[in-house]
Image: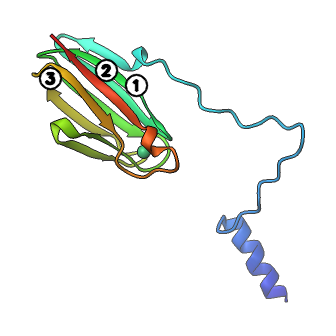
């Protein structure tokens, strides 16, 4: 019996097993992630548009990017929670976004139009909402 007790204690201490998180009434709820301003993550610099993008359940921030035809678009994307991806089907681009492993997408926006992007990895119930748009203006 002592051994069984010791094993349970070790499992709890090591984090293999966790006790259910008991919510006490009156305790503050955990904070939701704050929305991050889109424009703060987009920087224009002499013909290149730099985008510092995050992917999370279940959105891209920013989810709307406008560039001028001829601009170079450089997107550095990273997941802040679980496995996502960023795919731009019309451009044949797809990159997996593993947490902690940023991916870079860079291309010259040489055709006007709208290019949708999305996550193609199932990342939970809301993953179909993970969409955005790149607009290339004249
Ligand atoms: Cu996703």
- Residue drawn at (89%, 42%) of the image: 25
Q: Which mark is residue 62?
A: 1
The one of 97 and 133 positioned closer to us in this rendering: 133
Q: Residue 126 carries which label?
A: none
Location of mark 2 (residue)? 65
The one of 82 and 128 positioned closer to us in this rendering: 128
- Residue drawn at (59%, 31%) of the image: 33
Q: In this view, does 73 lie to the left or right of 34?
A: left
Q: In which quarter of the image is ligand 1?
A: top left
Instruction: For mark 3, give the secondary structure.
Output: loop
Residue 108 sits above or below residue 29 on the image: above
Q: Kindly report the distance in space between the C-alpha atoms of the residues bearing marks 3 and 2.
A: 12 Å
Give yes or no for contact between labels 1 and 3 (Cβ–Cβ under 8 Å). Answer: no
x, y (%) of residue 34?
A: 59, 26
Q: Quadrant of the C terminus?
A: top left
Instruction: For mark 1, give the secondary structure.
Output: loop
Q: Is residue 32 left or right of residue 120?
A: right
Residue 48 sits above or below residue 22 on the image: above
- Residue drawn at (69%, 68%) of the image: 17
Location of mark 3 (residue)? 109
Residue that extends furthest to the bottom in the rendered view of this protein: 1
Q: Is mark 2 within 8 Å of ligand 1?
A: no
x, y (%) of residue 67?
A: 23, 16
């Amino acid at each position: 019996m002592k051994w069984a007790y010791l094993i349970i204690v070790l499992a709890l201490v090591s984090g293999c097993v966790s006790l259910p998180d008991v919510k006490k009434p009156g305790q503050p709820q955990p904070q939701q992630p704050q929305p991050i301003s889109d424009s703060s993550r987009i920087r224009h610099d002499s013909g290149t548009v730099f985008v510092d993008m995050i992917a999370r359940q279940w959105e891209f921030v920013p989810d709307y990017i406008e560039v001028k035809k001829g601009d170079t678009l450089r997107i550095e994307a990273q997941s802040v929670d679980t496995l996502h991806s960023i795919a731009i089907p019309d451009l044949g681009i797809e990159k997996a976004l593993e947490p902690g492993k940023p991916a870079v997408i860079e291309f010259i926006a040489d055709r006007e139009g709208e290019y949708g992007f999305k996550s193609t990895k199932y990342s939970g119930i809301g993953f179909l909402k993970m969409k955005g748009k790149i607009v290339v203006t004249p």
